[in-house]
C-alpha cells in the first residue's frame, strides 16, 4: 500500500466513526481539513488503546511504538502515515509521547469521577499543548479529558463508570456518569473551529446517552448541519 493510500485509510477510518463531520466540514477551510482530520485520527488511535477489553498486551505494545514514533517526529523521522501529514508541524510531540503511559493507568476502574479525571489530566494537558500548534488554538485540558471519558463510556459502557456510581443498576449508572461528564465538560464550543465542531457532536452524543441511558441514533441531517454551523461560529 502506498503512503497516500495508507494515510487515506486512517483518515477514512476516523470519518466512519464520525459521520457528522462529513456534514459540517463545509464550515472548515479546505486547506485545514486534512490536517484536522489527521490530528483527530491520531488521537483516536490513542483512545483505542485506552478503550480495550481483554488482553492489554497488544495495546500496550502499540502505545510503546507510538511513544517512540512521536519522539522521532521532532527530528523529522516519521514512519506512520499520519506522521507524513502531522510531523511537519513544529509541536510538542515528545511531551505527548511522554503522556501516553497515562492511558494504561486510566484503564483501571476509578473510584470517583475526580479520580477518573485525575488519571488523564496529564494526557489532556499534552493534547492541549500540541493542539495549540496543530490547529492554532485549543480548549482546556479538562474539556479534552471529558471528551476522552465520553468516548470511553460510549465504547465500553458501564465498565468505564466510576465504581461508586455502579451500585444503582446499569442504565442508571450510565446516565449518571454521562450527566456528570456533561457538567464537567462545560461549553464544548471552545478551541479552534475544528475542535469546536467535533466537540459539539461528541457532547451531543453524550447528552443523548445521559438522557436515555444508551447510545441513540444521530439526529436528522439538517439538525447536524445547524449544530455544526453554530459550533463553527462559536455561538
Image (cartoon, helix red, strand yellow):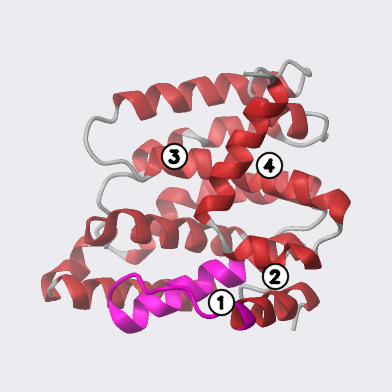
The span shown in magenta is 199-222
* Label 3 CA crowd tier, 10 Å (few <14, some 14–19, many 20+): some
Residue 129 can be seen, yes or no: no
Quarter in which the N terminus is drawn: top right
Residue 9 is left or right of residue 145, and the answer is: right
User: Of the residues under marks 1 and 4, which one precedes in the sequence?
Assistant: 4
Residue under circle 3? 102
Residue under circle 1? 186
135 relative to 188, above or below: above
Q: Are marks 2 and 1 in contact (CB under 8 Å)?
A: yes
Q: In the rendered structure, find residue 38 and report the number of the disc placed on it.
A: 4
116 relative to 206, above or below: above
Give the Cα separation between the discs numbered 2 and 3.
Answer: 24 Å
Select label 1 or label 4 by which is in front.
4
Q: Residue at x 65, y 22 (%)?
A: 71
Select label 3 or label 4 by which is in front.
4
Name the spot of residue 217 as percent of width and height, x first. Answer: 41, 73
Quarter location, residue 55: top left
Quarter in which the C terminus is drawn: bottom right
User: Of the residues under marks 2 and 4, which one precedes in the sequence?
Assistant: 4
Amino acid at each position: 500500500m502506498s503512503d497516500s493510500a495508507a494515510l487515506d485509510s486512517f483518515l477514512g477510518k476516523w470519518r466512519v466513526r464520525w459521520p457528522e463531520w462529513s456534514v459540517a466540514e463545509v464550515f472548515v477551510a479546505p486547506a485545514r481539513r486534512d490536517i484536522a482530520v489527521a490530528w483527530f485520527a491520531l488521537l483516536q488511535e490513542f483512545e483505542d488503546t485506552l478503550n480495550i477489553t481483554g488482553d492489554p498486551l497488544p495495546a500496550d505494545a502499540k502505545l510503546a511504538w507510538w511513544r517512540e514514533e512521536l519522539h522521532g517526529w521532532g527530528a523529522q523521522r516519521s514512519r506512520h502515515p499520519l506522521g507524513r501529514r502531522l510531523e511537519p508541524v513544529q509541536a510538542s510531540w515528545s511531551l505527548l509521547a511522554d503522556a501516553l503511559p497515562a492511558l494504561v493507568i486510566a484503564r483501571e476502574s476509578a473510584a470517583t469521577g475526580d479520580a477518573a479525571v485525575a488519571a488523564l489530566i496529564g494526557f489532556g494537558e499534552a493534547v492541549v499543548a500540541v493542539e495549540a500548534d496543530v490547529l492554532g488554538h485549543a480548549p482546556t485540558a479538562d474539556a479534552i479529558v471529558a471528551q476522552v471519558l465520553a468516548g470511553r463510556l460510549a465504547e465500553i459502557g458501564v465498565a468505564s463508570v466510576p465504581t461508586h456510581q455502579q451500585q444503582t443498576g446499569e442504565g442508571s449508572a450510565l446516565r449518571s456518569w454521562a450527566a456528570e461528564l456533561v457538567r464537567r465538560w462545560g461549553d464544548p464550543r471552545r478551541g479552534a473551529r475544528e475542535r469546536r465542531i467535533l466537540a459539539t457532536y461528541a457532547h451531543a452524543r453524550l447528552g443523548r446517552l445521559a438522557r436515555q441511558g444508551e447510545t441513540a441514533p444521530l439526529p436528522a441531517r439538517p439538525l447536524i448541519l445547524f449544530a455544526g454551523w453554530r459550533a463553527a461560529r462559536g455561538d
